[in-house]
Image (cartoon, rainbow, N blue to C red):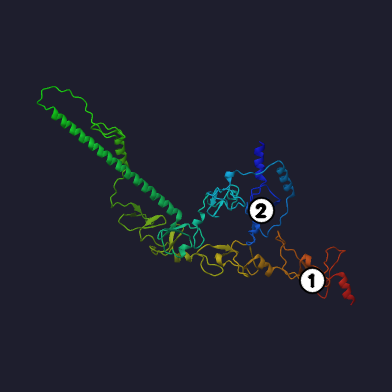
Amino acid sequence: MSQRWNQTESAKYSCSICLDLLKDPVTIPCGHSYCMNCINDHWDGEDQRKIHSCPQCRKEFIPRPGLEKNIMLADFVEELKKTGLQPAQADHCYAGPEDVACDFCSGRKMKAVKSCLVCLASYCQNHLHPHYESPTFKKHNLVEASTKLHQNICSHHDEVMKIFCRTDQQCICYLCTMDEHKGHETVPAAAERAEKQKKLQESRQQIQFQNREKDVKLLQQKMECISVSDDKTEEDSKASFPSSDKRRVKSRPLSVPLPPGPDPVPAGGVSPNMKKLIKNFNKDQPAPVPTSTPTKICGKCGKDLSSTEPALKAMGKLFHPSCFCCKSCHRPLQGMQFYVKEGSPECKCCYVTFLPPCSQCGEKITDRILKAMGKCFHVRCFLCSTCSCNLDGLPFIAGEDDKPYCVQDYHKRFSPQCETCKEPIVPAPGSEETVKLVALGKNYHIKCYQCEDCARPFSSEVDKYQGHPVDGRILCTKCHTKRTMM
């Protein structure tokens, strides 16, 4: 019972980054705890994005939260260490040279148990929890741990290859269909894989049928040999005992030696196993189909397709060439690029007509649509209106001119400016509220509210230093008295 309790406590008070007992534990705003050095190293790697997140729940924090040591948790971990509790991992849990290592472990890496086809990373059991618990990751496709994840990435566009080009017989990404594979016959890679597996299964059955056919022919040859041997034996018997001979001859069984085989065959007959094999062979042999009999159905008109008629294969179905046309303009699509909309094919012209235009460049959006501020954008067009940095995946603020700005440029342009330090007055770290002090129509940071002559800070208390307006300037009592006496 003690060992089981220790293992439970070991997991509860271990850092999910280094997998050791917490050292200088800190608790971040979402409630998860880490070693101070571990979470700092993790956030240092995210500084460039200016978004810091929790490694477990992926909650994001802007700006970077300050860290303070959790005294109570630190004292409790020290007590656990005194009892000799250590989160020892079995050697077989660590990744060996031939194992797939966890991409998230720091230090000695654990053995990965799953790979994510969306994140393109492999995870050990501990770091896999967010994919089961967080709604953001539950839709990700997990497979057995593999080192070949990046083989599914297009070398030209760095996108996942989910499309198969039948013209060039290779996997491509969706951007390739608009570039070097434009106009080619393409299908989803999963559908092509299913079809190839079906053909492979049919080939296997055909090979099995051919092997069985060879066995049946061999047995038939053995049966013919047996029949010839029986006839020869009967002729030899008649020659030895002619009918004119009046002697009575007592017949007796005649044994003919046969080549060794798996089944004994009685003279003049067929073994039960031979009969069963021939019966199964005749049963499994497909019945011939007349060439004039229709075997397929058109995916649009529902009429039969004869084997002598030309047919188009697309969207997992067969079509008459005249039936495979655009849903909107009825233009024939044979040999042309098409798009699938609500289960029906459309030519590129009709498909693009109904696509939303980009609010920035005005062009139709044919790839991923980025929606923000009630508008649609190309990903490449969603930029900060001041510094032109791409805002995809970054925090932004809609300005008073209804344009997007990164957080820094927004405050530079729209936030009130401090009269003393001339810097914009922005929310304090960890807060969304802007605190400013207004006097004589001027804005001040709380710390910058001071006498404009001697720079003595003012106080909000009645008996402390107060500000006095003189000729549009704010002065302390002493400087105010000095000026009024001049």
Residue 440 is labelled as 1
Q: Are marks 1 and 2 in contact (CB under 8 Å)?
A: no
Residue 264 seen in the current view: yes
In front: label 1 or label 2: 2
What residue is drawn where x is 73% and y is 52%? 69
- Percent of width and height locating residue 228: 20, 36
- In the picture, which quadrant includes the C terminus? bottom right
Mark 1 neighbour density, 10 Å: few (under 14) some (14–19) many (20 or more): few
Residue 350 picture location, percent across and down: 45, 65
Crowd tier of the residue under label 2, counting other residues whose Cα lies within 10 Å: few below 14, some 14–19, many 20 or above: some
Q: Residue furthest left?
A: 244
SS for callout 1: loop
- Give the amino acid at mark 1: Leu
In the figure, is residue 484 to the left or right of 35?
right
Disc with the residue nearer the chain's start (1 vs 2): 2
Q: Is residue 377 at all visible to an observer of this figure?
A: no
**To which residue does mark 2 refer?**
38
